[in-house]
Amino acid sequence: MNQKMLHRPFELYVADMELWYARPLKYHFFEIVQILEGEGIREVNENRYPYSKGSIFLFTPLDCRGFEMSTPTRFCSIRFSEVFLGKCKDEQERGRIAQWLRQLEHIFYHHNRFERMLIKEEADCQMISTLIGNMVQEYEAQQPYYEENLQHFITLVLNILARNVADSKLNVPANPQPEPLINRMLLHVHENIRNPEQLRISHLASHFNLSANYVGEYFRKLTGESLQQYITQYKMQLVQHRLTNSALTVSQIAAELGFTDESHLNRQFRKHSGVSPMEFRKNVKSM
């Protein structure tokens, strides 16, 4: 899978869809895309959804994303990393944003993987369009304090998107279909990736009312890989994301993601990526 890094903490541009890469890529940054004109198909994590004028998407780091046009399409793309939102003047604010981004990671990952995210309130659509328009003006003018203003605009947009995700969980149909068990298991893994005790076979069996002997068999049947392979792969993706988009040390990343220590993370990462975490970070910065 081809990949794309963000070489600056923030980028914004308006362009025709012909500039989008022909095949889906895995990007290592957050991205908000608003469709200004046109219709077609959005592809994310092997799911396909229609888009039209006014559609707004949020992609998280490590989502595989792409578009297929059915009519000429023009879009606004806002790309940013944790580094951009983390440029706060005090440690408390930086900590709050780091926690907030981690929550958004698995909220939007879940929706991008399993269902289409809709912004139901017309007022919210209008508000996001206005905020994106303001961001374009700020970015092009680059007046004093424009970066601080862009940070606030992005925060507002993400809050509105997060509110729509939260609200969608409340608006269930009269006879809702239960969410597939595998979806609930995957979401549990994402939400508890930093807590190894919550990912043990015994805990999953108890939590999902399954036989301990059946958990691994069921997971492999539905995903094509073992539970441990999936957990390791997802952790390695998160480590790559932290190395690319944050100033956290390897030791801090190890503690955050539930590794025994820095040496444990180094061994796992080298086995997965072929290089050490520090070599990976150095290679990213030199791209």
Image (cartoon, rainbow, N blue to C red):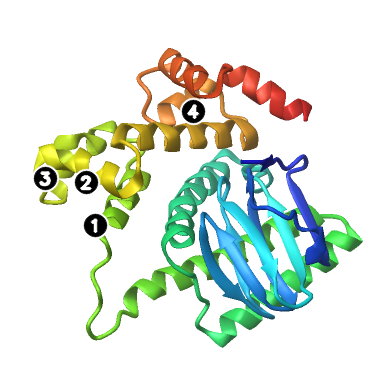
Mark 3 or 2: the one toward you: 2
Give the labeled residue for mark 4. 253
| Total marks placed | 4
The answer to which of 215 and 176 lies nearer the viewer is 215
Image point 24% across, 38% down: which residue? 198
Q: Viewer-nearest of labels 4 and 1?
A: 1
* SS state under label 1: helix
- At label 2, counting other C-alpha atoms closer than 10 Å, the crowd grade (few under 14, some 14-19, many 20 or more) is some
Examine the image and state in which quarter residue 167 appears. Answer: bottom left
Q: Amino acid at mark 1?
A: Leu
| Mark nearer the N terminus (3 vs 4) | 3
In the rendered structure, are the residues bearing label 2 and label 1 in contact, judged by CB atoms less than 8 Å apart?
Answer: yes
* Residue wearing tag 2: 218
Which residue appears at 77% of the width and 73% of the height?
73
Quarter of the rendering occupied by the N terminus? top right
Q: Secondary structure at mark 2?
A: helix
Disc on res. 206: 3
Asked whether the residues under the numbered discs 1 and 3 touch, taking CB atoms below 8 Å apart as contact, a structural biologist would say: no
| Between discs 1 and 3, the one toward the N terminus | 1
Secondary structure of the residue carrying numbered label 3: helix
Query: In screen coordinates, is 16 left or right of 243?
Result: right
Q: Residue at x 75, y 49 (%)?
A: 10
* Pointer 3 local density, CA inside 10 Å: few below 14, some 14–19, many at least 20: few
Q: Nearer the viewer, mark 3 or mark 4?
A: 3
Mark in the foreground, 2 or 1: 2
Q: Position of residue 101 (x, y in %)?
A: 52, 49
Position of 212 relative to 173 (above/below): above
C-alpha separation, residue under disc 2 versus residue under disc 4: 31 Å
Q: Earlier in the sequence, mark 2 or mark 4?
A: 2
**Which amino acid, mark 3?**
Ser
Q: Residue 70's spot in the image, x, y percent?
A: 70, 75
Label 2 close to label 4 by CB (< 8 Å): no
